[in-house]
Image: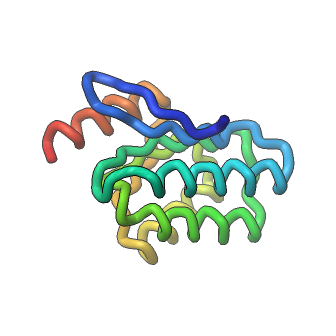
């Protein structure tokens, strides 16, 4: 399972571990798993940490990530992404612009978890 839930500083966070995915098929499976699990949550209740460290993005995967972000919008309050390359940062900005989602890039998982916990407590 690449999508799991953890608790950080009292805040439940959905971790999408898309790191070091070797093939497009594996990536699409991980994206589908995330969509299914997050879709079972209450609306406006999920904080996500997505780790894309060491994974490449193809046009197909970019589109799948875009669709995942749109599908999960009713459930996700805010999200942080780690492991973003320069190209992935451009893709992330595009997803944010098109979907209107609150997504930020952070340098480490720890930084992302802290940011998400602070967002949850401020909200």
- Give the total number of marks visible in the rendering: 0
Which residue is painted at 57% across and 68% down in the image?
66
Which residue is painted at 32% across and 29% down in the image?
114
Instruction: Check the image and name the residue furthest to the top.
Output: 9
* Image quarter of residue 59: bottom right
Q: How is the image coloured?
A: rainbow
Q: Position of residue 41 (x, y in %)?
A: 39, 50
Q: Compared with residue 52, is residue 32 higher up or lower down, i.e. above or below?
A: below
Q: Position of residue 19 (x, y in %)?
A: 68, 38
> In the depicted view, which residue is nearer to us: 68 or 102?
68
* Image quarter of residue 17: top right
> In the depicted view, which residue is nearer to us: 88 or 5?
5
Instruction: Check the image and name the residue furthest to the left.
Output: 122
Q: Compared with residue 54, is residue 96 higher up or lower down, i.e. above or below?
A: below
- Left or right relative to 92: residue 61: right
- Left or right relative to 18: residue 120: left
Which residue is painted at 49% across and 68% down in the image?
71
């Amino acid at each position: 399972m690449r999508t799991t839930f953890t608790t950080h500083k009292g805040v439940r966070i959905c971790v999408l571990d898309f790191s070091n995915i070797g093939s497009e098929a594996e990536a699409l499976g991980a994206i589908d798993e995330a969509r299914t699990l997050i879709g079972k949550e209450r609306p406006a209740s999920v904080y996500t940490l997505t780790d894309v460290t060491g994974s490449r993005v193809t046009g197909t995967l970019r589109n799948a990530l875009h669709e995942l972000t749109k599908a999960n919008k009713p459930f996700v309050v805010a999200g942080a992404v780690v492991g973003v390359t320069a190209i992935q940062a451009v893709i992330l900005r595009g997803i944010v612009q098109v979907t209107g989602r609150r997504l930020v890039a952070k340098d480490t998982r720890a930084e992302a978890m802290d940011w998400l916990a602070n967002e949850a407590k401020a909200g």
